[in-house]
Image (spheres, rainbow, N blue to C red):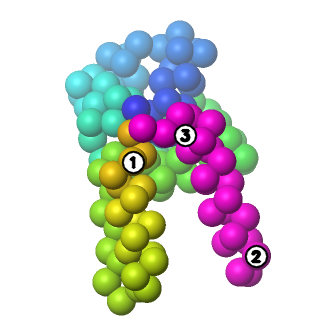
Amino acid sequence: MTPFGAKMRALRRERGVSQKDMARALGVSAAYLSALEHGRRGAPGWALVQKIIGYFNVIWDDAEELERLAETSHPRVIVDTSGLSPVATELANLLAASIGRLEPDQIRSLIDQVEAALEKRR
């Protein structure tokens, strides 16, 4: 499941909405919504994210969160390290090979470390 899929499922369940009803309102199939929730489809496009924001009537920070989650919810990520340092390639390969063996708290810690390092660069 992707971060966007998890959030969409949570919103849908909080409001007691079925995939079928939501799909009909958005003009997509229930199978597509299911695939989005389970990470079997790529990140949704901007137009669909806006429809989902409108459907759930979310505003401001919650809408921005949905947009951010959609941008970071590609279930198949390709990291092109050509032109980067050998250590960058090593990191990308290590992560690709081992991410499935990490616990959620370890993954969260790595995300926090990367975000902190990027903040220092600004």
Closer to the chain start, of discs 2 and 3, is 3
CA gap, disc 1 and disc 3: 34 Å
Q: Where does the image place residue 28, in percent across and percent down from the top left?
A: 27, 33
Vertical position of residue 3 compared to residue 80: above or below? above
Residue range highlighted in magenta: 101-122
Q: Is residue 14 above or below residue 7?
A: above
Of marks 2 and 3, the one in the foreground: 2
Residue position marked by numbered label 3 in the rendering: 53
Label 1 to label 2, Cα distance in Å? 26 Å
Type of secondary structure dominating the magenta stretch:
helix
Residue 54, above or below 76: above
Quadrant the C terminus occupies: bottom right
**How many numbered dots are placed on residues in this image?**
3
In the picture, the disc for residue 37 is none
Q: Determine whether, in the image, residue 42 is placed left or right of residue 11.
A: left
Residue at x 36% of width, y 89% of height: 83
Looking at numbered disc 2 in the image, what kind of residue is underneath it? Lys
Asked whether 118 falls inside the magenta stretch, the response is yes
Q: Nearer the viewer, residue 43 or 24?
A: 43
Which residue is denoted by mark 2 in the rendering?
Answer: 120
> What secondary structure is marked by label 1?
helix
Image coordinates for residue 90, horizontal then vertical, percent:
40, 70
Q: Please tell me which of labels 1 and 2 falls first in the chain.
A: 1
Of tags 1 and 3, the one toward the viewer is 1
Q: Is residue 104 magenta?
A: yes
Identified at 32% across, 74% down, the residue is 80
Q: Which quadrant holds residue 46? A: bottom left
Rendered location of residue 21, percent (x, y): 37, 17
Residue at which label 1 appears = 98
Of callouts 1 and 3, which one flags the residue occurring earlier in the amino acid sequence? 3
